[in-house]
Image: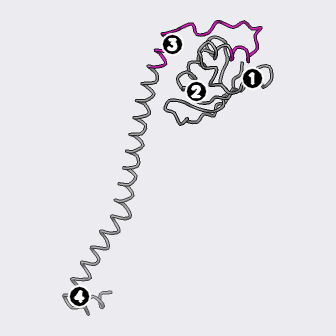
Amino acid sequence: MNEWWETLQSRERYMVLITAVLVSVAMLYFAIWSPIASSRDTKQKRIEAKRETVAWMSQKKQEVEDLKSINPNLFNRASDARSLLAIVDAGAKQMGIRPTITRIEPKGEDSVQIWLENMTFDSLIVLLAELERRNNIEVTDASLNRSDQIGKVTGKVTLNR
């Protein structure tokens, strides 16, 4: 290597050194700086999206609390004699959201599936919270998708007593 270097003219040596420096800088940029900067940008976008989600959830929390303060007794305490299907149906009717439930199907004595279409998310959360609080009915499975309308969801929820 030394022999090769010595055979080069000073102008060629200068060009080789410049090329080596440029290649080294390019390697540092593409191997270290670029991935770090890209990762940082991606994480900043994620953080911003999560902040927006938290702000949206805080707003919706207040709306849910407002709904509950309007009518704190949305549900009458159900007796143990009523079926799970009857309790869910009565609760949905009392809240005025029964039309958005397209189907209620019993799955044995202690389980029921409900299908929703364009139900406001806030109303769904209030319904589920009241069912749990007043009747000890819990959500065991939920598959919800955003509806085309803002704040509304479509999907299926399985409830157990």
Residue type indicated by callout 1: Ser
Q: Identify the mark nearer the N-term, 4 or 3.
A: 4
| Residue 111 circle label | 1
Three-letter residue code for mark 4: Glu
Label 4 with label 3: CB-CB less than 8 Å: no
Q: Are marks 1 and 2 in contact (CB under 8 Å)?
A: no
Q: CA distance from mark 1 to mark 2?
A: 21 Å
User: Which image quarter holds the N terminus?
Assistant: bottom left
Q: Which of 60 and 117 lies nearest the eye of the viewer? A: 117
Q: Report how far apart the C-alphas of labels 3 and 1 lie in the structure.
A: 26 Å
Q: Earlier in the sequence, mark 1 or mark 2?
A: 1
Q: Is residue 10 magenta?
A: no
The span shown in magenta is 63-89
Q: Closer to the observer: label 1 or label 4? A: 1
Instruction: Tell me whether circle 1 and circle 4 mark residues in contact (CB < 8 Å).
Output: no
Tell me the tag on residue 24: none
Marker disc for residue 12: 4
Q: CA distance from mark 4 to mark 3?
A: 82 Å
- Tag shown at residue 119: 2
Q: Is residue 119 above or below residue 130?
A: below
**Residue position marked by numbered label 3 in the rendering:** 68
Up/down of 21 relative to 155, above or below? below
